[in-house]
Image (cartoon, grey):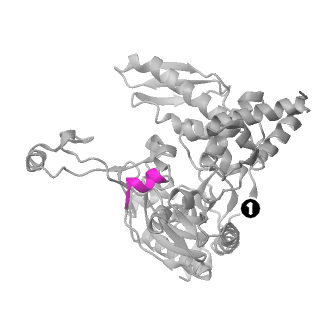
Amino acid sequence: MTENNQIKQRVEETLARVLGVSPNEVSALGMGLHPRWDSMGHMELIMQIEKEFGLRFPTYEIAELVNPAAIVKAVERVNHK
Amino acid sequence: MYSTAELPVTIPDELVDDFLAKLHYVSESLERFELPSERNSVRFQVTPGREHDSSLIASRIAEVAKKMCDAHRPSEAKVLVSRKSTGHYDLDPQPILEREGELRRFGQGRYGLGPRLVGLTTFFDRELTRMFESFSPEPHQFPSLIGADVLESCKYLRSFPHALTLVSHLREDLAAVQDFARSAKWDGKQLLSDPSHLSAIECLLAPAVCFHCFAWLQDSRQAQDRSFTAVGKCFRYESGNLEGLERLWDFTMRELIFVGSPEFVLAQREKAIAATTQLLDEWGLGYEIRSATDPFFIEEYASATFQLAFDLKFEVRANLPYKGKTLAVGSFNFHQDYFGRSLNITNSAGVPVSTGCVGFGLERLALAFLAQHGLDQSNWPASVIDQ
């Protein structure tokens, strides 16, 4: 498994755990598309992703992390810095 | 005697005011506290006789620091507008107003206003209402009481528990009412009575005007974009942070409220910022309009970062020259579809509506104006004197 695939899998597993869904359902979700991924749930989700990868997103980037693909890209970007 | 709470983190400079504001809620035994310049410990003093609470207080202070810092992200404030005051006054007008019988303190966060201050707050409310006319808002009037069900649905109870003002009355029980009438007594600090005579909590005193508007629209379909305006009393208990007219427990707010598509709400908010700028400039005020957050309690502190990330809140911060600080006198808020979802307010297609509001604290506006222009009307801008 490539590093990018590993990141994608860990992101999906974390989102699945927080949202209470199966990992293979995650890719179709996004902010506002699941009852727990609302404005209040968004920060909880972001903080769990940060904990999983040991990183911290800057404030301005948090508004862009509204679906799994965007989160995966952001983690990859931070990891490669 | 001072004790020290060692913090597990260093409090970032931009978080200091918020952190200290939260410490008032740590314990009733906590009398004084200060954050040394290293910002990695808190020195505090407890009420005499309550020294045994010190270690618990220290651990709670550390908990507050950890939770707030975990949720905090550094960010630069976005400043949309910055103006210098045309006034040259630099004294605190409040002691003068109190001496002149224009301001009366009834208790912590509770003040009465005399004719001059009422004249100013009435003027500001009239001018704001006039400015709001271009938004064609539907005028409404709401009670000071708000149902606990509404605040629970909006998760306000969870986000701002520290600021709630709960309302009770005597139970419908003849013996309880008679016993209360016989025995209730003011002991100089509080009303002593049997708590078992009090009813369960059904209502609170409203913390904002717009909640009433959203409750009005609960479980409805909105076929078109709408605007509302109302003025009302708002109640936010802020413990040791309550300070004169700067921070009242009980204050008056004029609001302009938007309900509709996100594009409509955001466009109205932008228009309101432009119109407000023009109005504040006419009053010769020094201020900034800048990004801001609400004072979420520690468990929900991450919501403040969310507000900044999504540009949800901007405040008008007016200069208080006597303090060398600024004071929020108004705000421009975009709630996304939060209230639409929470209270089941949808558009005709069944999609939750977006909402936003613009609010001005009338007592704070009066204070900021007097703090910059003084009490001598001959030094006021013509646009205000002429009214």
Chain label for disc 1 = B
Work out whether A10 lies above or below B283.
above
Q: Crowding at label 1, few (<14), some or many (≥20) Cα neighbours within 10 Å?
A: some
Label 1 element class: strand
Q: Main secondary structure of the magenta part?
A: helix
Residue B72 in view of the camera: no
Residue B146's quadrant in the figure?
bottom left
Q: Residue at x 79, y 32 (%)?
A: A9
Instruction: Measuring from the top left, give residue B320's x and y in whole percent.
Output: 60, 55
* Viewer-side residue, B59 vs B202: B202
* Viewer-side residue, B225 vs B88: B225
Q: Residue at x 69, y 73 (%)?
A: B271
Instruction: Measuring from the top left, give residue B74's x and y in whole percent.
Output: 74, 40
Q: Which residue is mark 1?
A: B82
Work out whether B344 lies above or below B172.
below
Instruction: Measuring from the top left, give residue B119's x and y in whole percent.
Output: 45, 74
Quadrant the N terminus of chain B occupies: top left
Q: Residue at x 50, y 49 (%)?
A: B155
Direction from residue A15 to residue B109 in the image, left or right: left
Instruction: Measuring from the top left, give residue B300's x and y in whole percent.
Output: 57, 41
- Residue range in magenta is B145-153
Question: Does the magenta-highlighted stretch encompass residue B61?
Answer: no
Q: Residue at x 51, y 21 (%)?
A: B58
Direction from residue B328 to residue B164 in the image, left or right: left
Work out whether B179 lies above or below A14.
below
Report the amino acid beneath label 1.
Answer: Ser
* Viewer-side residue, B267 vs B94: B267
